[in-house]
Amino acid sequence: MKWQKEGEVLIKEFEFSNFTEAVKFVDSIVPLANDSDHHPDVLIHSYKKVKISLTTHSEGKVTQKDYDLAEKIDSLV
């Protein structure tokens, strides 16, 4: 699945083999988010799916920061 723009949010869902792998993926996002000072909303659901939502809250819309972090997140899988 590609990143989808829904309103003013970029969204993508990732599916892993189990809960542990889903949590490891989320953990791997932490340094990327901290380094860029841009933090996604993260939802782990159905025990092995991770939904990432990106928006620049201060701008109230999707900005280049969101696209940059999305690309970095994609590079993890």
Image: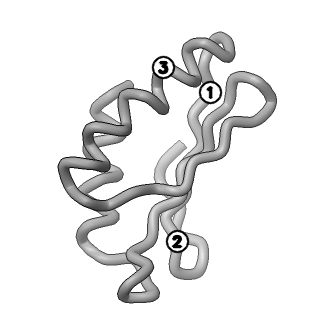
- Mark 1, Cα crowd under 10 Å, few <14 / some 14-19 / many 20+, is some
Q: Secondary structure at mark 3?
A: helix
Q: Secondary structure at mark 1?
A: strand
Sequence-earlier tag: 2 or 3: 2
Q: In the rendered view, does 35 fall on the left or right side of 70?
A: left
Q: Residue at x 54, y 42 (%)?
A: 1
- Say which residue label 3 marks: 24
- Type of residue at label 1? Glu
Give the position of the C terminus as an image quadrant: top left
Sequence-earlier tag: 2 or 1: 2
- Mark 2, Cα crowd under 10 Å, few <14 / some 14-19 / many 20+, is many
Q: Nearer the viewer, residue 56 or 1?
A: 56
Q: Residue at x 35, y 51 (%)?
A: 70
The relative height of residue 4 versus residue 73 in the rendered view (above or below) is below
- Say which residue label 1 marks: 15
- Label 2 to label 3: alpha-carbon separation: 24 Å
Q: Secondary structure at mark 2?
A: strand
- Say which residue label 2 marks: 9
- Percent x, y for residue 40? 46, 56
Sequence-earlier tag: 3 or 1: 1
- Percent x, y for residue 18? 67, 12
- Type of residue at label 3? Lys
Q: Quadrant of residue 19?
A: top right
The relative height of residue 22 versus residue 34 in the rendered view (above or below) is above
